[in-house]
Amino acid sequence: MAPSPAAPEAFTRAVAGLRASAPREEILLEEISAPQRLAPYGFALSATVLRDGDEVASGRLILLHDPAGHDAWRGDLRLVTLITAELESDLAGDPLLPAVAWTWLTDGLEQHGAAYTAIGGTITQTTSTRFGELAGPAPTADLEIRASWTPTSDDLGAHLQGWCTMLASTAGLPPPGVTAFNRQRAAT
């Protein structure tokens, strides 16, 4: 969704920064409609993360702008994210996983020099087992990251790169330039 012609310059620059930043090739970004009731101005991106051609994580990054600002935001721009990823079953019950997942966000932002304040969020681990008429595949495990933070400048390219780094970590992608060891080939 394009910013309206009357959008404030700070919001227009912020959107331009998000649009100009390119993620790594395994992360596919698409502009989607932003929620309308959260702030006077909004912009949103949807991400799909692929590993070996399979979708392993997805996310949304929403930019909110209220020229009047919000006390809780400590600014007039706010980034909000929701990321979900499938987990390997042995990770689902790891009590350290939420703390590690949180560092994926903060480390990603810091690695790209994305200055922020007023950061907060939740990490949720779930396991699902199907029964009866829904019986089917083996139990599944998922990780959900919900977070928001206030960028301290309206140049948001670094924030998008930090968010994409978090997406890659959540999806279990190796760092850029590192080749993943294929478990299936190793078993043969």
Image (tube, grey):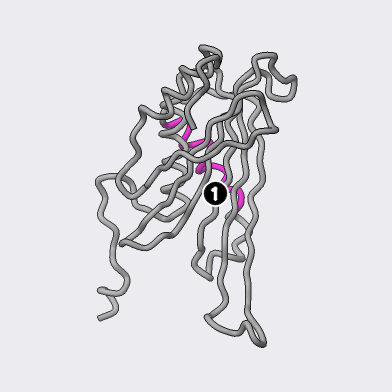
Q: Residue furthest right?
A: 71
Q: Nearer the viewer, residue 47 or 168?
A: 47
First to last magenta residue range: 98-111
Image position of 136 with respect to 181: above or below: below
On screen, residue 184 versus residue 97, left or right, reads left
Q: Residue sitting at 58 percent across and 31 percent down?
A: 79
Image position of 70 with respect to 173: above or below: above
Q: Residue furthest front?
A: 5
Q: Nearer the viewer, residue 124 or 178?
A: 124
Magenta highlight: main SS: helix
Q: Quadrant of the C terminus?
A: bottom left
Q: Which residue is mark 1?
A: 83
The percent coordinates of residue 61 (x first, y second) are: 53, 38
Q: Residue furthest bottom?
A: 132
The percent coordinates of residue 118 (x first, y second) are: 66, 26
The percent coordinates of residue 71 (x first, y second) are: 74, 19
On screen, residue 71 versus residue 120, left or right, reads right
Instruction: Residue type at mark 1: give it.
Output: Ile
Rendered image quadrant of residue 29: top left
The percent coordinates of residue 176 (x first, y second) are: 29, 44
Q: Residues within 10 Å of mark 1 (few under 14, many from 20)?
A: many
Give yes or no for residue 103 being in the magenta stretch. yes
Give yes or no for residue 52 being in the magenta stretch. no
- The secondary element bearing badge 1 is classed as strand
Q: Residue sitting at 62 percent across and 82 percent down?
A: 134
Q: Nearer the viewer, residue 12 or 129?
A: 12
The number of discs equals 1
Q: Residue sitting at 64 percent across and 14 percent down?
A: 67
Q: Residue sitting at 65 percent across and 23 percent down?
A: 40
Image position of 83 with respect to 143: above or below: above
Rendered image quadrant of residue 78: top right
